[in-house]
Image (cartoon, rainbow, N blue to C red):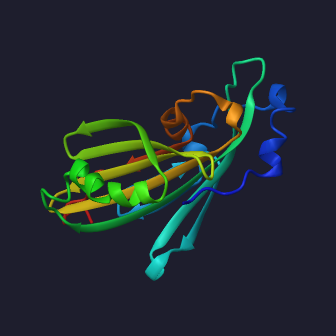
Amino acid sequence: MFARALSMLALGLTAAAPALAQAPAPAQEWPAVELAPGVVFAADGSVEIEAGPGGVPVVTFWRPVLFREESKYPVGGRMDCRVVAATQGYSDAAFDLEATYEAEKSQRKREGHVEEDRARAYDGDVRELDIITRRRKPHDHHVLSYIAIKRDTQLVQIRRNCSFVHGYEVGTVDYLAYVNRYTGLRMAAPQTPSES
């Protein structure tokens, strides 16, 4: 639902492939936005903040990308991401990302999403569940990330939805690798009352 039409810039990338550097800039140079106290979203591209439903801040990000960049005929495309975050009291139910996704799965099916793969990264107080989907109309791929960060008695919940618009000739692509290459979260240790 967050996909946009392929821009002329992205269409022109194929012709300019040899001159286009796909390696991201050093992460410390990326534009960054604080999603919650001590939790920052950063990305190598255009990062902006807009008002979402109910006035909730939505961080948006986009950049042109090259698919099949190592091949003789790379394919130009575009990557768009939308990121929202909310902080609430911790609960085991809210920390169960699989259950959260299953509760929303039928809605995504109605929107035309077909699940292709999923990846999990659970590390103590930080959990991430990535759902990779495709749609036929419009033809695009998505990586929907459910991220939960436990901070003392609080839980920061983050949703990152990245869409990839491209031609049919793109073939098989690891879309999650593009998400991890061009976006990231930075977390500072929570402060104790004596430190604040």
In the rendered image, the quadrant that contains the C terminus is bottom left
Can you give x and y, in whole percent of width and height, for residue 195 in the image? Answer: 24, 61
- State which quadrant residue 87 falls in: bottom left
In the rendered image, the quadrant that contains the N terminus is bottom right
Q: Residue at x 23, y 60 (%)?
A: 155
- In screen coordinates, is 76 left or right of 137? right
Comparing 118 with 9, the one in front is: 118
Can you give x and y, in whole percent of width and height, for residue 100 in the image? Answer: 25, 56
Is residue 91 something that shows in the picture?
Answer: yes
Comparing 130 with 192, the one in front is: 130
Q: Is residue 175 above or below residue 145?
A: above
- In screen coordinates, is 91 left or right of 56? left
Q: Is residue 66 above or below residue 165?
A: above
Q: Residue at x 56, y 49 (%)?
A: 163
Can you give x and y, in whole percent of width and height, for residue 157 in the image? Answer: 31, 59
- In screen coordinates, is 177 left or right of 194? right
- In screen coordinates, is 88 left or right of 168? left
Q: Residue at x 52, y 30 (%)?
A: 174
Q: Report the number of discs.
A: 0
Q: Is residue 193 above or below residue 190?
A: below
Can you give x and y, in whole percent of width and height, for residue 177 in the image? Answer: 51, 32
Q: Residue at x 57, y 29 (%)?
A: 173
Is residue 188 something that shows in the picture?
Answer: no
